[in-house]
Image (cartoon, rainbow, N blue to C red):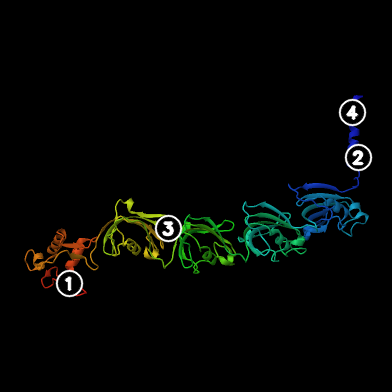
Amino acid sequence: MIHRLHLMILLQAVLITFVACNAPLVPLDDIVIEKTSVPETCVRAVQSGDFVRYHYHGTFPDGKKFDSSYDKGSTYNVYVGKRQLIEGMDKALVGMCVNERRLVKIPPKMAYGKDGYGDTIPPNSILHFDVLLLDIWNPEDKVQIKTYYKPENCGRTIEVSDFVRYHYNGTLLDGTLFDSSHNRLRTYDTYVGIGWLIAGMDQGLLGMCVGEKRIITMPPSLGYGENGDGSDIPGQASLVFDVVLLDLHNPKDGITVEKLDAPETCLRKSNVGDFIRYHYNGTLMDGTLFDSSYSRKRTYDTYIGKGYVIAGMDEGLLGVCVGEKRRITIPPHLAYGEEGTGTEIPGSAVLIFDIDVIDFHNPSDTVEITTIFKPSKCDVLSKKGDFVKYHYNATLMDGTLIDSTHSYGKTYNVVLGSGQVVLGMDMGLKDMCIGEKRTVVIPPHLGYGERGVEGEVPGSAVLVFDIEMIDLEEGLPDGYMFIWNSDVTPNLFTEMDTNLDGHVDPVEFSNYINHQVVTGKGKLAPGFDAGKIIDNMFSNQDRNSDGKITADEFKLKDEETKDHDEL
């Protein structure tokens, strides 16, 4: 009994399975939607009245293809909800997002019904569509702007007629890249608001500041319209531009000057014709460094207002003080113009220079002398030929120490007017008395000139010396290297000729002169090598250069003609 019951149950199950597998298909009453791919984010979904662009494959339930937009090489572009599509597709597209993919099954009554469509769609056909949505827009759409980065300082924003330089990536709404300034390795440069751009970009750029980053989305009516651009941008396409603004100016702009630091005292300001030495960092508006004097480890040296530098810098360097730091912003028409430099500075670039003024002078400048201290008794003043001993600290105009005698623990000793120091120092040391202190400012043409001293004094540098006169020895009259302090003996030659051989040799001559100096009867010019002076005096007397002086050759200075220097 139990076995018969089990057998009957088994037969019943087999019968049910057979009937189910061979039952006729239940007719569709509505569309069936299967979402086969959904994007992570959906900014906007299709609504009735929107215009869409999508790709599709159309097949019958058995998989046989009857149509495909891919085969046509173009999306299907149409309004939704305006009876431009079969009813089922009109309904299936609502709620879709860009890059969403749907498999849609449409019953005959919502497709081509009992009539079908020519030879392509038989009557009462169920249609399957594999749909990929690429674009949505609405005739009411405007430009959409999303700023995703804005610098803290935004002093100026784009206005109509401004000229801008920006980078961009241009994509369709589905993310397909159609253009990029980054790929061309150069910015897009244009005027804003005067019709040089598509209308949506003209609107989308307004109000941006340098460094700002925006996503600008525009409908085709503000982009390339029904026809696209003929190549990468299809007709009726929404456009998305990811923009970063690098530069901004107006043709009416002049330079702007911002003082970053100024010295407490400013005795003199730069004028046209001055020669200036300054350090600088040169950047574009986005902060890109294009040049720096610091990297070359030397100042930039030039005349002001003479056209040796770009017009904006010529103007920006006027009125500066030594030690001043300022930021000079220069529009391209006062810099390198539309062409740029061809390397580091792009065309139509605004330039920013942060400068530090080291010194300046004028070719007409002379030595500036400021007396810091003068003793109450100051009767003997230094003059040309005097042998002076002094201490000094030498600096550049910005205070950079060059040299100091104090670090050596000894004075610097020179004969004034003999060319042992630069001309400016010769001038600065004159008319000083022992104990006097001065500050002497020497322009480069009276100092070390354009070349300077390698490793010590920069070329064209103004020098500042703080000096103190320590000692002063009166020199000889101009043109003399030896003088007699008393009457000259009439037996001068005989006294020199100690061995009485009728001539004076170099040893006899040197011994005699040195004896006169030691005994105070004669004096050699101070500050020079005594041996060299005596050798020169002997050579002047030894007229035939035979190494000895005879009585006929011997003459005193006042017995000589003007062209021969003697005793």
Q: Which mark is residue 558?
A: 1
Residue 479 relative to residue 14: left or right: left
Q: Answer with mark 4 or mark 3, whichever residue precedes in sequence.
A: 4
Q: Is residue 73 visible?
A: no
Residue bearing the label numbered 3: 397
Q: Closer to us: mark 4 or mark 2?
A: 2
Residue on which disc 4 sits = 6
Residue at disc 1, secondary structure:
helix
Q: Which residue is mark 2?
A: 19
Q: Residue furthest left?
A: 500
Dot 4 and dot 2 residues touching (CB under 8 Å): no
Q: Is residue 211 left or right of residue 60?
A: left
The secondary element bearing badge 3 is classed as loop
Amino acid residing under circle 3: Met
Q: CA distance from mark 2 to mark 1?
A: 153 Å
Mark 1 or mark 4: name the one nearer the start of the chain. 4
State the residue lying farthest toward the right.
114
The quadrant holding residue 385 is bottom left
Residues under numbered marks 3 and 1 in contact, where contact means CB atoms less than 8 Å apart:
no
Amino acid of disc 4: His
Residue 156 appears at what percent x and percent y?
64, 58
Q: Position of residue 316 (x, y in %)?
A: 53, 63
Circle 1 Cα neighbour tier, 10 Å, few/some/many (<14 / 14–19 / ≥20): few
Sequence-first tag of 2 and 3:
2
Could you tell me which secondary element the residue under label 2 belongs to? Answer: helix
In percent of width and height, residue 272 lies at 49, 67
Neighbor class of circle 3 (other Cα within 10 Å; few <14, some 14-19, many 20+) is some
Whether tag 2 and tag 1 are in contact, CB under 8 A, the answer is no
Residue at image coords 15%, 58%: 518
Does dot 4 land on a helix, a strand or a loop? helix
